[in-house]
Amino acid sequence: MTDANAPFPRKIDISLTVNGERVEARVDASRHLVDFLRLDLGLTGSHAGCEHGVCGACTLQVNGDIVRGCLTLAAQLDGADVWTVEGLTDTGALADLQAEFVTRNALQCGFCTPGMLFSAADLLAGHAHPTRDEIREHISGNYCRCTGYEAIVDAIETVATARAAKAGVPA
């Protein structure tokens, strides 16, 4: 006989890949992905900002899609492939974006930067020549309180142009 008032299982066993490495963990059923990464794995690149999925500071990549780490439960990710800004930095996938963010001073305090980089990379993966309006639209889910966005848009536009030229994609 089960007790109707008994709490649901509090701990869930998960096995996932984080930044190319297999991770097995027992997580609290209510632990959010961004907290799991930061507190349990020590991957502090993504930030917990608004905790409502609005600011974009917790943006990560799960199974190739960008997601809000504050809205995604770690327990949902059994078998998933998760990438953080640390992992994509190590692979070099963000190197040109990171360098241009530095050149343009598009990362003043750095709190929004990981989310901005994920959003920019997501845009550029599917669009060789985004317009400035398309860039603004794609990063609109990421708040920045320091830059006024122009430097960020400039950096993304510059990288898009350079990548397209390198790939021989006509403008």
Image (cartoon, grey):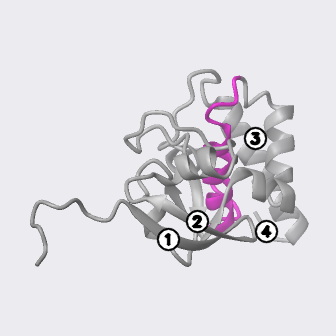
First in sequence, mark 1 or 3: give its number. 1
Amino acid bearing label 4: Pro
Give the numbered dot on residue 25: 2
Q: Which residue is mark 1?
A: 13
Amino acid bearing label 2: Ala
Callouts 4 and 3 close, C-beta under 8 Å: no
**Location of residue 168 with respect to 72 vertically, above or below:** below
Q: Which numbered disc, 4 or 2, marks the residue closer to the eye? A: 2
| Distance of label 2 from label 1 (alpha carbons) | 6 Å
First in sequence, mark 1 or 4: give its number. 1
Label 3 CA crowd tier, 10 Å (few <14, some 14–19, many 20+):
many
Callouts 2 and 1 close, C-beta under 8 Å: yes
Q: Which residue is mark 3?
A: 155
**Location of residue 30 with respect to 114 vertically, above or below:** below
Q: Quadrant of residue 3?
A: bottom left
What secondary structure is marked by label 3?
helix
Q: Which residue is mark 4?
A: 170
Give left or right: position of 46 versus 162. Answer: left
Looking at the magenta stretch, what is its main secondary structure? Answer: helix
First in sequence, mark 4 or 3: give its number. 3
| Distance of label 2 from label 3 (alpha carbons) | 38 Å
First in sequence, mark 2 or 1: give its number. 1
Give the numbered dot on residue 88: none
What secondary structure is marked by label 2?
strand
| Residue drawn at x 68%, y 55% as measured from the top left | 84
Callouts 4 and 2 close, C-beta under 8 Å: no
Image quadrant containing the C terminus: bottom right
Callouts 1 and 3 close, C-beta under 8 Å: no
Q: Which numbered disc, 1 or 3, marks the residue closer to the eye? A: 1
